[in-house]
Image: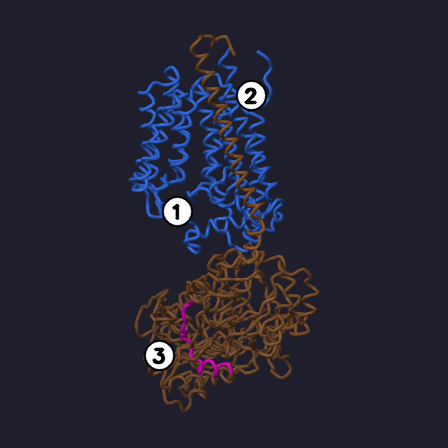
Chain colours: A brown, B blue
Amino acid sequence: MSPAFTLGDPEQEHRLLRWRIVLAGLLMLAIFLAIMVRIFHLQVLQHDHFTTLSQSNRVKIVPIPPTRGLIFSSDGVLLADNRSSFSLELTPEHIEDLDGTIDRLREFVEIDAASINRFRNRLGKNRRFESIPLQFNLSDEEVARISVNLYRFPGVDVKARLNRYYPLGANLAHTVGYVGMIDERELATLDRSNYSATSHIGKIGVEKAYEDLLHGKVGHQQVEVNAQGRVIRVLDRTPPVPGENIYLSLDVSLQNIAMDALGERRGAIVAMDPRDGSILAMASSPSYDPNLFVNGIDSPTYRALLSSSGTPLLNRGLQGTYPPGSTIKPILAFAALQHGIRENDAETWCPGWYQLKGSSHRYRDWKKEGHGHTDLRKAIVESCDVYFYSLAQDLGIERIHEGLAQFGLGQKTGIDIGGESSGLVPSREWKRRALGQPWYPGETLIAGIGQGSTLVTPLQLAVATSAIANRGHVIKPHIVDEARDALSNKKLLDSGREVIHRVRQTESEDWEEIIGAMHDVVQGERGTARASGRGANYQFAGKTGTAQVISIGQDEEYDEDIIPEILRDHALFIAFAPLESPRIAIAIIVENGGSGSSTAAPIARQLFDHYLNTEESVARE
Amino acid sequence: MKEQSLSERLHVDMPLLFGILVLCAIGLTVLYSAGGQDMSVVYRQGVRILVAVLIMLIVAQIPTMQLSRWSLWIYLFSIALLVLVLMFGHTGKGAQRWLDLGLFRFQPSEVMKLALPMAVAWYLSEKHLPPSLGRIIMSFFMIMIPVVLIVRQPDLGTAVIVAAAGFAVLFISGISWRLIGSLSMLAAMSAPVFWYMMHEYQRQRVLTFLNPEQDPLGTGYHIIQSKIAIGSGGIYGKGWLNGTQSHLEFLPERSTDFIFAVFCEEFGLMGVLLLLCAYSLVICRGLYISAYAQTMFGKLLGAAVVLTFFVYIFVNMGMVSGQLPVVGLPLPLISHGGTSMVTLMAGFGLLMGIHTHRRLLSD
């Protein structure tokens, strides 16, 4: 004790306090002893009692997965269904000899090597005391056989799960998409409590984009279980909230016709309603069976899909990028009218080729002998290349870029299912940035007939075609029309019309001029696709396109017979119908299909004939 | 003046720090198991511990004399904050405890756990001890004002701690045994008043505590399950990560308030013995520091901090083993969560300060 505190009073006070502190210490010690006695009582004296209770601990809270929402087409066809199936599941923590158990299980249930591999992959990645599926889709017979023997396999369960099933399979694989088992990456970003009982999640297409609506809300139940964790009795239940049912704008009959029309060929068809952006059909060929992915695809099959030259996994409608060829001619003609660099009746002389000043290179027209005197309408109807070379030169690449971009080309459309490519509409700036090269005048001419670096997706073409059809409204396309509560059928989401951009118009006749020319393409005397327009009981408008895959040398001829198929031209066609008050706009691409007029245009006619002559389309009005 | 060691210059008390770190290490180990082997939970808790230790070191730098001068103001400021919480507080889990300061949320009742014993210790050490009856009555009001404010939030657990911290100072100050007796009588008689003031869910907890079996699926579920977890642990426990009660999700709140049940299930009686030894080390060192503090203020405050720490342990273990009602207090330094951790560490910082600023006084 320091000399500063030698006064009698404080010294006594300190002693008093120290005594109280010692007392407090003794009190705490006594209470600690009491706690030890209590714990001793529980852990030693009552140990057997509590061990029994623990082993037969009966009240447990288990999550119940919600039923995933169904997906329907606009004509009421079920596109994604839930089918109940039985799976064999193992809880590793309850199993001593895992390999032995699996071997013995094989006496009762057929377990393939791929399933075992998949099971081993999941080992150690799950939460402890959580069961892992070993084999899906057990047959009734297998369920019966294993069920009576289950007592011999602690930690093994047969669980009934609802499995996603896509009745139409390949025909809608790209748009509806599929669900698959939740992987680690997804697990990290999920709401864990809501997905605590869910094994599958939307991987692509509508299934992925509308996961939030489709999934629903997890439920819980208090159950009585035995020592192996098997449920004996349900005590209390908070039911899950099922996911919402989703109704697509897609028309299955139209979709089927589109898929059949493409057949074995590679290509894509996008049909949409130009009034509100509803996608009516989106076909991509070749396709694949989405049901393969639901419970995990085996690797040989997956590798085959990946390496197939037809790239079936690619959704060509959204992700395929193609040179648009002559299909963009109406749009460029409109841009020329907008800027006042072409009059409707001003004529250009077409000798069958075009030359830039000071260059000997001849840019050829598809028609060797030339179109002669050509005005704007004739240039579109007969798809005169020379007219558009000259027009492109006068517009210049910047105005071409702007003219195409205002119709939504070369940019994502913002479709609700996402995953689309943006394509490319070139400009000086782009070339400098991407390639570090200056823009050459010849490239402007090529861009004028939709060749060169210009790349668009079929969906973009459909949106641009819709914009022509509705006279300037670039509309955001959507596949999902509405979502409804599965129980009350109350409408919860309603995709309406969303205009992204309004094309500036100088004079209203401009639209009539362009649309009139497109009408003549299919139903005029000299139109490139007049064969497809003949005999229709409605009026429509279109434009053919034939996109080169390889460039043909100055002295060479394009001869379809000697060129390998993969290098043949892509056939394109855009169209909308009926001419007045259009209800359907369409973009078709058949890869290496030859000419747009002979390959693509007839498909459009087939689709229009069906769509415009059935009751459903009239009902949509 | 002799050469100061590094720990003295940093104002760190090594035995105390050692005990604290041992407890934190035990905490992280149990948390890994209780949190479902999620390493990210452990990392986050580790960061919280680091922050709390840093705050402890900062608090330890404040000279004790300085603290006693600030005590009243800190106390009044905390009272003002508690009033603000009741008026504008943020509602979390159905109770108003948080004050949203834009950048972060802040729980004034936590500050009160240290502000109250500081203020009472300052007030009593002003005059001779044991205190006069007038001063005792005055102290009683100093304690009851914040306690009532916190009960109204409602936060029964924190109210218990704050009251304990305040009465600990009174007890250490040497009030007569007769007074202690009559105060206990008073507390017993005021129980009905508290019952009236309590919220419905708090009353339910008390009822459940008195008879857990009456509602095995509702509020009694916690206690029954945690008793099974403790009892089935036995002498040596089921082993780390092997507690079926906790991993099969029978145990609620297993990484926070009920983490002691997980500990008992996996490490058994031997584990509990070891844990209580670690706690005793911290408590004994704390009491030693208090007993040899040079000022009355230091003695009173130091002992109050230790007693508060003890009340946490006692109440938590009591409720988890079914001997006390479930009031929602964490097991100090072990349970997952950061708010009470910071307050506890700041308290240890005060203790270290009391101990390491001694020599400066005597010069």
Write down the region rendered in magenta. A242-259
Residue located beneath label 1 in the image = B205
What amino acid does circle 3 point to?
A: Pro
Task: Provide the chain ID for the residue under circle 1.
Answer: B
Magenta run includes residue B308: no
The reply, left or right, for residue B199 in relation to residue A595 is left
Q: Residues within 10 Å of mark 3 (few under 14, many from 20)?
A: some
Q: Which of A245/B203 is in front?
A: B203
Image x and y of residue A224, in percent:
50, 62
Residue in view at x 68 percent, y 66 percent: A101
Residue at disc 2, secondary structure: helix
Residue located beneath label 2 in the image = B9
Residue at disc 1, secondary structure: helix
Residue at disc 3, secondary structure: loop
Residue located beneath label 3 in the image = A582
Labels 3 and 1 share a subunit: no
Labels 1 and 2 share a subunit: yes
Q: CA distance from mark 1 to mark 2?
A: 48 Å
Image x and y of residue A373, in percent:
43, 80
Q: CA distance from mark 3 to mark 1?
A: 69 Å
The reply, left or right, for residue A269 in relation to residue B39 is left
Let me know if residue A355 appears in the view.
no
Q: Is residue A256 above or below residue A446?
A: below
Image x and y of residue A505, in percent:
33, 68
Q: Residues within 10 Å of mark 1 (few under 14, many from 20)?
A: some
Q: CA distance from mark 3 to mark 2?
A: 86 Å
Q: First in sequence, mark 1 or 2: give its number.
A: 2
Residue in view at x 59 percent, y 42 percent: B269
Magenta run includes residue A244: yes
Q: Quadrant of residue A252?
A: bottom left
Image x and y of residue A521, in percent:
42, 83
